[in-house]
Amino acid sequence: MHRPFPTRKTLGTRYNLKPDTRPVEAQRLQPGDVVVLEPECPTVVTRMLRAHGGVHVWGRYIWEPPHAPHWPLGDFGAQERVARALPGEYRTPPRPTDTNP
């Protein structure tokens, strides 16, 4: 079972709106990662396109159902830092090959 989150993280909702994050290079993001580009609006990465030294990312908010359409989160330089939720903040499979922050 997933651990419950304190109210300061959920802001009274059933979602973790304030996950602990660490900045990572945009090129290291993968579908399924949760990123925080705006305060209290965590977003699941649903699709990525890597081209010409950059990354175009699509996603949906964590409260949207999986069948909801995804939308563009933005274009990022490959080395640009993006706030990604730490392991354990959301139910996602572990990524043992991604240990370098």
Image (cartoon, grey):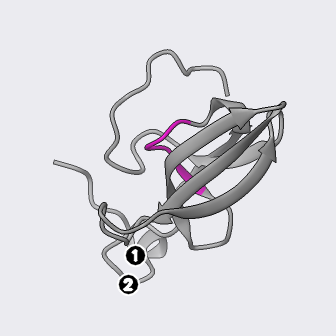
Give the residue drawn at x 45%, y 81%: 11
Tell me if I can see residue 25 in this picture.
no
The image position of residue 97, as x and y in percent, is 50, 15
Name the main secondary structure of what is drawn in magenta.
loop
Residue 78 shown in magenta: no
Asked if residue 96 can be seen in this view, the reply is: yes
Please identify, in this view, whether the residue under mark 2 or under mark 1 is nearer the observer. Answer: 2
Q: Label 2, on which residue?
A: 12
Magenta stretch contains residue 31: yes
Q: Which residues are magenta?
A: 30-35
Q: Amino acid at mark 2?
A: Gly
Residue at the (31%, 60%) spot, across then down: 66
The residue wearing badge 1 is 7
Q: Residue furthest bottom?
A: 12
**Residue 3 image position (x, y, % from top left):** 26, 53
Residue 16 placement: quadrant:
bottom left
Secondary structure beneath dot 2 equals loop
The answer to whether residue 101 is above or below residue 72 is: above
Label located before the other in sequence (2 or 1): 1
| Residue toward you, 56 or 83 | 56
Examine the image and state in which quarter residue 65 appears: bottom left
Residue situated furthest top in the rendering: 97
Give 6 or 83, whichever is nearer the viewer: 83
Quadrant the C terminus occupies: top right
Residue 81 disc label = none
Tag 1's secondary structure? Answer: helix
Is 54 positioned to the left or the right of 19 in the image?
right
Label 1 packing within 10 angstroms: few (<14), some (14-19), many (20+): some
Task: Assess disc 2: are there few (<14), some (14-19) or many (≥20) residues with their C-alpha within 10 Å of its C-alpha.
Answer: few
Across and down, in percent, residue 7 comes to 40, 75
Q: Are marks 2 and 1 in contact (CB under 8 Å)?
A: yes
Is 52 positioned to the left or the right of 65 in the image?
right
